[in-house]
Image: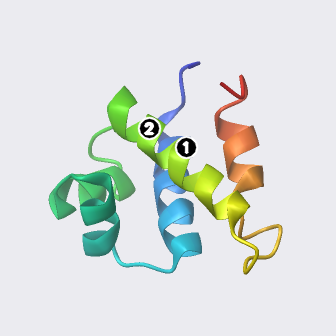
């Protein structure tokens, strides 16, 4: 994975969570992390580690599989912009 800049990480976390239509607490539970971690990420205090970034990419892939979402909600744009190598 290429290096992702702090503002991009902040937007990635916030946008992913908003597209899932969930609060920070529920997003944290889905990721198996603390609410405080998500809050710190979104407020640009710390960067997510590679493992949570992988989990966020997986959530974006799941959004793409949902027939109930529009193209923008699917997260394909976020995933392609952030994870350029497409893993």
Vertical order, 66 against 55 (above or below): below
Who is closer to the viewer here, 35 or 67?
67
The image quadrant where one finds the C terminus is top right
Q: Position of residue 9 (x, y in %)?
A: 49, 43
Q: Is residue 84 left or right of residue 9?
A: right
Left or right of residue 56, residue 85 in this image: right
Q: Is residue 10 above or below residue 70?
A: above
Q: Tell me which residue sits at (54%, 29%) in the image.
A: 4
Q: Nearer the viewer, residue 86 or 24?
A: 86
Q: Percent from the top left, x then y, of residue 40?
A: 25, 53
Which secondary structure lies at badge 2? helix
Q: Secondary structure at mark 1?
A: helix
The image's colouring method is rainbow
Location of residue 57 (image quadrant): top right
Q: Left or right: where does residue 75 sit relative to residue 46?
A: right
Residue 41: image location, x then y, percent: 33, 50
Disc 2 vs disc 1: Cβ atoms closer than 8 Å?
Answer: yes
Label 1: which residue?
Answer: 57
- Residue at 29% x, 57% y: name it: 38
In percent of width and height, residue 58 lies at 53, 46
Q: Is disc 1 surrounded by few (<14), some (14 to 19) or many (20+) residues within 10 Å?
A: many
Vertical placement of residue 43 versus 1, above or below: below
Q: Residue at x 72, y 28 (%)?
A: 84
Q: Residue at x 51, y 80 (%)?
A: 21
Which quadrant would residue 30 be assigned to in this image? Answer: bottom left
Q: Residue 53, which numbered label?
A: 2
């Amino acid at each position: 994975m290429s290096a992702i800049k702090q503002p991009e990480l902040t937007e990635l976390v916030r946008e992913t969570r908003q597209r899932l239509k969930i609060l920070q607490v529920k997003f944290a539970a889905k990721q198996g992390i603390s609410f405080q971690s998500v809050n710190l990420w979104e407020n640009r205090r710390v960067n997510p580690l590679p493992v949570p970034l992988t989990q966020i990419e997986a959530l974006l892939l799941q959004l793409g599989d949902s027939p109930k979402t529009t193209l923008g909600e699917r997260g394909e744009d976020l995933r392609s912009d952030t994870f350029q190598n497409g893993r």
